[in-house]
Amino acid sequence: MDAHQRKEMKKALRLQRKQLAARFQQVVMEASYEAQKNIAPFLEYRSLKKIVQTFTNDPNNDFEKWACNPRVLEMLYRAKEAIDNGTMTEDEVEHMMLSYIKSDQNPGKEVFKMKTQQKARLATEQLVGALNEHLVERRAGNDAYKAKKFEEAMQSYIKALSIVNLVAGMSSEDQKEIDLNKVSCLLNIAAVHMAKKEYGSAIIKCSEALEMDGANIKGLLRRAKAYAGRREFEKAHADLSKVKDLEPWNLEAEEVGRHIRYLRTQDADKDRALCAEMFSSE
């Protein structure tokens, strides 16, 4: 009897796993292209796939809230790098990330950060060399961007960002300089995403930059344009309002505002034309 019960239990568990896998696949297929693209790099990792699957547990069934969340994506990329570098096992990553997601107060959060974001603390003279190296990559990225070689530009900007992500200053002034350059790298990457009309990715990078410098005019304007590209006009207007509060005379903000009004008019015209076509008589 016991053997039969164990067999039935295993059968039920297998069925449950199949049902969960089928539900996850359905949720992903119904999600936006942006959400699908965001999670794709993590599905090849057992532990990271489990984390992504937890997004389907949202009480409001809002999978995209998590799949398009800049902090969650940053966390997943850090975990992926830690696995690839061999600094953490998949089991460690799974444990740390679940703790991180469940509670900001969980001590696992700090352990996770420590293991996945190791930085070299450099004296000023050493830091100058690292920042010069990062500037070489950024300038190469700028040249490629101007030539519309966007993939080359992206690779250079990512290399530049990886350099500033690996160093920390020994003084507040040095750290301020590192952070300033990191914000610039993030906005460079966002610019490439914008050029490729990858508006969701541009929003993520702009948001990361604005978390470090909430009054960054370029970041606010770039994110407003990206929101407009996604027809998220209220969010775009919110960023433009911040710009106007900071710089009432900003001409680019006025230009972006006019572009948003044009897009809204264009969308309204399309809606009216569609309605007219739907209800027109044969």
Image: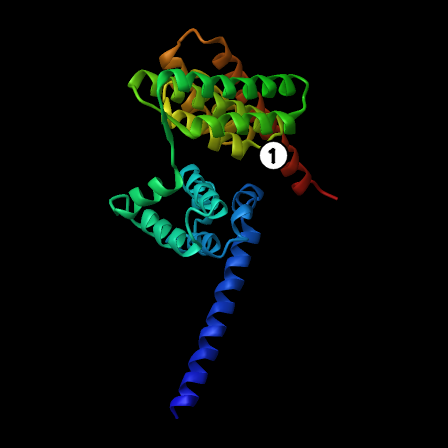
Report the side of 176 relative to 106 (left or right): right
Residue 235's place in the image compared with 248, above or below, is below
Q: Position of residue 198 (x, y in %)?
A: 58, 33
Which amino acid type corresponds to the residue marked 1 in the rendered image? Asp
Taking the spot 47% from the left edge, 19% from the top edge, the residue there is 221
Q: Nearer the viewer, residue 120 or 111?
A: 120
The residue beneath circle 1 is 271
Q: Position of residue 168 (x, y in %)?
A: 36, 26
Extreme residue in the right direction: 282
Residue 20's place in the image compared with 66, above or below, is below
Label 1 residue SS: helix
* Residue 181, quarter of picture: top left
Q: Nearer the viewer, residue 146 or 161?
A: 161
Q: Position of residue 264 (x, y in %)?
A: 55, 26
Residue 110 in view, yes or no? yes
Taking the spot 52% from the left edge, 68% from the top edge, the residue there is 18
Report the side of 118 relative to 272 (left or right): left
Taking the spot 48% from the left edge, 30% from the top edge, the residue there is 162
Residue 249's place in the image compared with 18, above or below, is above
